[in-house]
Image (cartoon, rainbow, N blue to C red):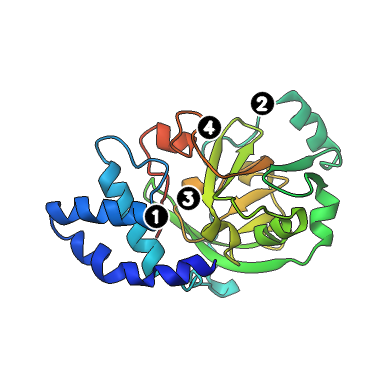
Amino acid sequence: MSNLVTRRIFITSAVTASVTAAGAGATALLAKLYGLVPPDHGGLFGVGETLTYAAQRVLLHRQPLAREFSRNDISKNFPAINTTLPQDHAYQQDMTGGFRQWRLAVDGLVARPTEFSLAELRSYPSRTQITEHICEQGWSAIAEWTGVPLSFVLNAVGIQPQAKYVFLYSVDGWWDSLDMADAWHPQTLLAYRMNGRELPVPHGAPVRLRVERQLGYKNLKYLSGITVTDSAKDWGKGQGAQGAENGYSWYAGI
């Protein structure tokens, strides 16, 4: 995390240079120098993805919180879209038993690979936050989420120094990743409650990701595993996310 602070020297040169096309190339070089290049930096829109990611990482280096709301602001309707009931047979069997067999495997660049049960996650220090979910499809809604901060789980397994990404994958086959800044952010949760109740199945039970400073598609439902790594190249096409391979940005900061 201390590296983010030292990158403040990047602000004047990188952000200013991004104003012009020539500056964009210079900014991309500076982004590479300071380790601020996203996995989807290649291709037609690669420079733009790099500029967006690098500029936001520098400007938000103090890890500000996303806005939190009061209970009176909670939306009466929070849409459940895409997968609302995984077709996985083992998942559906476990669902009827209250997810007692569910495990979240955490491996990769960690000192202590671990499988966490739902009961174990619930026993750890929790955080509750009321935040706005902003969907790339043009709608938004506010909900209350309770869960264990991802940072607590990462500390429990012992992250190795060379770690750069946290990959997360789901029962329904979807996968995505975060950089370490978002992984350590205090509002990034492994959420198991929504609006004061157990997380509903259409919204990702038993545990979903909440990463409040990115668009809705980064908030994976039905989590089944986490892998910590120093590279994205061995995942899919190396763009860091299934969504990025389908035309979305890997970094969806708001």
Q: Is residue 61 visible?
A: no
Which residue is tagged 4? Answer: 235
Do the residues bearing badges 2 and 3 touch, measured as CB atoms within 8 Å?
no
Q: CA distance from mark 4 to mark 2?
A: 23 Å
Give the secondary structure at mark 1.
loop
Disc 3 on helix, strand or loop? Answer: helix
Number of residues whose C-alpha sits closer than 10 Å to that of mark 3, classed few (under 14), some (14–19) or many (20 or more): some
According to the image, label 2 marks what residue?
87
Look at label 1 and name its amino acid.
Leu
User: In the image, is residue 13 above or below residue 109?
Assistant: below
Callout 4 touching callout 2 (CB < 8 Å): no
Asked if residue 150 can be seen in this view, the reply is: yes
Q: CA distance from mark 4 to mark 1?
A: 19 Å
Amino acid on which the number 2 mark rests in the picture: Gln
Badge 2 element = loop
Could you tell which of marks 3 and 1 lies nearer the N-terminus? 1
Residue 46 lies left or right of residue 6; in this view the side is: left
Q: Is 209 situated left or right of 94 in this image?
A: left
Residue designated by label 3: 216
Amino acid type, label 4: Trp
